[in-house]
Amino acid sequence: MPIYEYKCDKCNKKFEMLVMGKDRPACPDCNSATVTRVMSACGFISKGSGGETVSSSAGAASCAGCTASNCAGCGV
Ligand SMILES: [Zn+2]
C-alpha cells in the first residue's frame, strides 16, 4: 500500500496518508479536502555515484521538511 505525503493548501500542514485507489485525503488539522500530493523522494535510499548507501538515519532527520522539488537532505 502506498503511503503518500500531502500538503494542505489551506493551512500548509504536511501529513502522510495511506490512500486506497482514488480516495482523496482530507487534512487532519482543518479537514480541508484541498490538498496537494507531494512526491516524497525520501522513500528511496539512493546510492551515491561511488556506490555507497546514503545514511538512512541522517536522511530521515533531514527529510522531515522534504518536498519533491527541494530537499537538501536527500539531494533532490
Ligand atoms: Zn489543513
Image: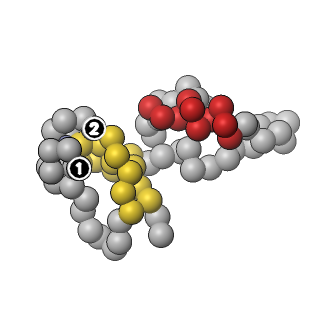
Q: Is residue 69 something that shows in the picture?
A: no
Numbered mark located on residue 5 in the image: none
Q: Residue at the location (24% across, 35% down)?
A: 12
Q: Quadrant of residue 41?
A: top right
Q: Quadrant of residue 24?
A: bottom left
Q: Is residue 35 above or below residue 18?
A: above
Horizontally, is 10 left or right of 75 in the view? Answer: left
Horizontally, is 2 left or right of 56 in the view? Answer: left
Mark 1 CB within 8 Å of ligand 1: yes
Q: Is residue 24 above or below residue 54?
A: below
| Nearer the observer, 28 or 40 | 28
Q: Secondary structure at mark 1?
A: loop
Horizontally, is 30 left or right of 12 in the view? Answer: left
Check disc 2 and give the amino acid type: Lys
Earlier residue among tags 1 and 2: 2
Image coordinates of residue 1 in percent, x first then y, are 47, 69
Image coordinates of residue 27 in percent, x first then y, are 22, 49
| Nearer the observer, 61 or 19 | 61
Could you tell me if the residues under marks 1 and 2 are in contact, i.e. CB atoms within 8 Å? Answer: yes
Numbered mark located on residue 13 in the image: 2
Q: Secondary structure at mark 2?
A: loop
Ligand 1 falls in quadrant: top left
The residue sitting at the bottom extreme is 21
Label 1 – label 2 distance at C-alpha: 9 Å
Horizontally, is 75 left or right of 3 in the view? Answer: right
Q: Badge 1 is on which residue?
A: 28
Q: Residue at the location (28% across, 47% down)?
A: 36
- Mark 2 neighbour density, 10 Å: few (under 14) some (14–19) many (20 or more): some
Mark 2 CB within 8 Å of ligand 1: yes
Check disc 1 and give the amino acid type: Pro
